[in-house]
Image: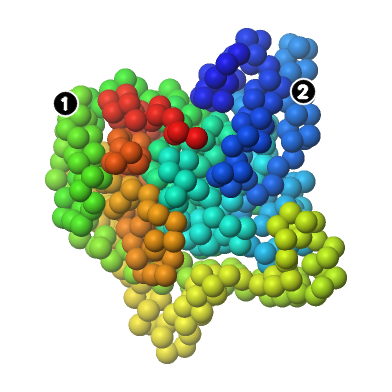
């Protein structure tokens, strides 16, 4: 069967179950594509092809016995290297974890495996998920499949590139301030950050615990819906996971945007790249023609979100990363390095410390929490965080979802912003507010500017993922950008 690497998740599982193809054939097709193309992109950090092939055989054997392996039977997926997959290294894009052996499967991995999904490997990322371009990885950058001279976005850059390049039907990412949605926009794929608490964080290495969420990157909203239905739900291992019943998100997709009230915060969108704005405006007009009502809304405190985020996120990171203390992790001895299998994979590991961005965040976070500065910075940031959350509550009184561009510009060139961290931080101006408020956000491809993908973001009230996916599904149909395949 040709085109196996371009098929959607539901379509693949159905074809495998109907024996039109097999899980083994599907996995082999993806592994060959990775072997052929990933050298130029750099999405994967580690793989276990033998395990993937064995898991696929098991799915086929279960089907042959007349069993149902699950909703994702034989669907190949790949995982951001900040989520535990037993049997594979967890690097978090850092050399400090060079001797860490992953002790267990994260809850999301257990759920995906129980549904029949096949894990192909672990994906490159900014070190400890800190970054917007994947250039902070200790293992080198990832390249954007639409233009190899450009970044894929970050910090889930490997996840976005892998799904865009057809290496996997779905990839998991993590989103603390935009790390699923921003790379999804840059690579022309769908990215969903669920409501805080919708998906268990057990087995996700923490960056900023009050902001982090795991979510899927896919090539359609239907696939995002299917993925969320599998990974969402309460977990005894994560006290912040919600007991709320998991919906059938696929059933809620619907046919059109008719009757949907879409809020647009025009004042917040000043300074957006003209090419991005043109695609955004076309999309809003198309949704309106499809029957949506476009509502003017305001998010008066949203312009303070980046500053607020870099106080809250760095404070939490400085606390979370204190465990990487050079005693249990980050051994710097010659013998540690020479015993490391990562040394063979990635070369010299003798300097096994943090990279510069992680150090910058820890120093900043320690500062804002320190006596004498706590009230002026950390406490004030928490107050502004509350104001940002209230802005959303007020806005959602008059609309069902809020639409903005996902990013102020399309993918930038490798190296273009590395010398200027503040400019890099602005890439998340539209994504960060949702994390601060805990609400869900979805980025959907809506068009192209100079050949580069443009993403539109929908943000919704707490636990209204179904509404976001319905809006995204309508946009996909109207703009047709989601199906586009990059030239790799
Ligand atoms: N780019 C933002 C940062 O560097 C967000 C990262 C994330 O969502 N993990 O912190």
Q: Which sits in the foreground, 204 or 23? A: 23
Q: Is residue 485 left or right of residue 139?
A: left
Residue 454: x and y in percent read 32, 41
- Look at the numbered disc 1 and give the secondary structure of its residue: helix
> Does 246 sit above or below residue 43?
above
- Look at the numbered disc 2 and give the secondary structure of its residue: helix
Residue neighbourhood size for the residue with mark 2, other residues' Cα within 10 Å, grouped as few (<14), some (14–19), many (≥20): some
- In three-dimensional space, the C-alpha distance between marks 2 and 1, rounded to whole angstroms, equals 48 Å
Residue 432: x and y in percent read 37, 57
Q: Residue at x 69, y 47 (%)?
A: 46
Residue neighbourhood size for the residue with mark 1, other residues' Cα within 10 Å, grouped as few (<14), some (14–19), many (≥20): few
Sequence-first tag of 2 and 1: 2
Q: Which mark is residue 289?
A: 1
Residue 444: x and y in percent read 36, 37
Question: Could you tell me how many numbered marks the image carries?
Answer: 2
Q: Residue at x 57, y 16 (%)?
A: 2
Q: Residue at x 35, y 41 (%)?
A: 452
Q: Is residue 462 visible?
A: no
Report which residue position mark 2 lands on: 57
């Amino acid at each position: 069967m040709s085109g196996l690497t371009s098929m959607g998740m539901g379509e693949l599982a159905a074809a495998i179950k109907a024996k039109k193809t097999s899980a083994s054939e599907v996995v082999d097709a993806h592994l060959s594509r990775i072997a052929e193309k990933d050298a130029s992109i750099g999405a994967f950090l580690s793989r276990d092809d033998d395990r993937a092939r064995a898991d696929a055989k098991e799915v086929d054997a279960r089907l042959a016995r007349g069993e149902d392996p699950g909703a994702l039977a034989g669907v190949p997926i790949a995982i951001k290297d900040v989520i535990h997959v037993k049997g594979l290294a967890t690097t978090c894009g850092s050399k400090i974890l060079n001797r860490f052996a992953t002790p267990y499967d994260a809850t999301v991995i257990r759920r995906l495996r129980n549904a029949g999904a096949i894990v192909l490997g672990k994906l490159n990322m900014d070190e400890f998920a800190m970054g917007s371009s994947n250039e902070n990885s200790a293992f080198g950058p990832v390249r954007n499949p639409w233009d190899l001279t450009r970044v894929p976005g970050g910090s889930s850059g490997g996840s976005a590139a892998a799904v865009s390049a057809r290496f996997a039907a779905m990839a998991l990412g993590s989103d603390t301030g935009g790390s699923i949605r921003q790379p999804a926009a840059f690579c022309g794929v769908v990215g969903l950050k669920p409501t805080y608490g919708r998906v268990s964080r057990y087995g996700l290495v923490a960056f900023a615990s009050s902001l982090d969420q795991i979510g899927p990157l896919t090539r359609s909203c239907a696939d995002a819906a299917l993925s969320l239905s599998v990974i969402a739900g309460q977990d005894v291992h994560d006290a912040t996971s919600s007991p709320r019943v998991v919906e059938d998100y696929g059933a809620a997709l619907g046919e059109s945007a008719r009757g949907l009230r879409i809020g647009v915060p025009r004042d917040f969108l000043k300074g957006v790249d003209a090419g991005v704005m043109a695609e955004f405006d076309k999309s809003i007009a198309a949704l309106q023609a499809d029957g949506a009502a476009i509502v003017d809304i305001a998010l008066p405190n949203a312009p303070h979100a980046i500053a607020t985020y870099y106080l809250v996120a760095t404070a939490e990171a400085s606390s979370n990363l204190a465990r990487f203390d050079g005693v249990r992790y980050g051994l710097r001895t010659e013998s540690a390095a020479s015993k490391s299998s990562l040394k063979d994979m990635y070369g010299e590991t003798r300097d096994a410390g943090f990279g510069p961005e992680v150090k910058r965040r820890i120093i900043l976070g320690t500062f804002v929490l320190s006596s004498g500065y706590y009230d002026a910075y950390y406490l004030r940031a928490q107050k502004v965080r509350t104001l940002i959350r209230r802005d959303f509550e007020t806005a959602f009184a008059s609309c069902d979802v809020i639409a903005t561009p996902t990013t102020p510009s399309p993918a930038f060139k490798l190296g273009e912003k590395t010398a200027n961290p503040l400019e890099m931080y602005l890439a998340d101006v539209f994504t960060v507010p949702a994390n601060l408020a805990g609400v869900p956000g979805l980025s959907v491809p809506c068009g192209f500017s100079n050949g580069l993908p443009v993403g539109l973001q929908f943000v919704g009230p707490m636990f209204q993922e179904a509404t976001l996916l319905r809006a995204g599904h309508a946009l996909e149909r109207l703009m047709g950008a989601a199906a586009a395949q990059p030239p790799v």
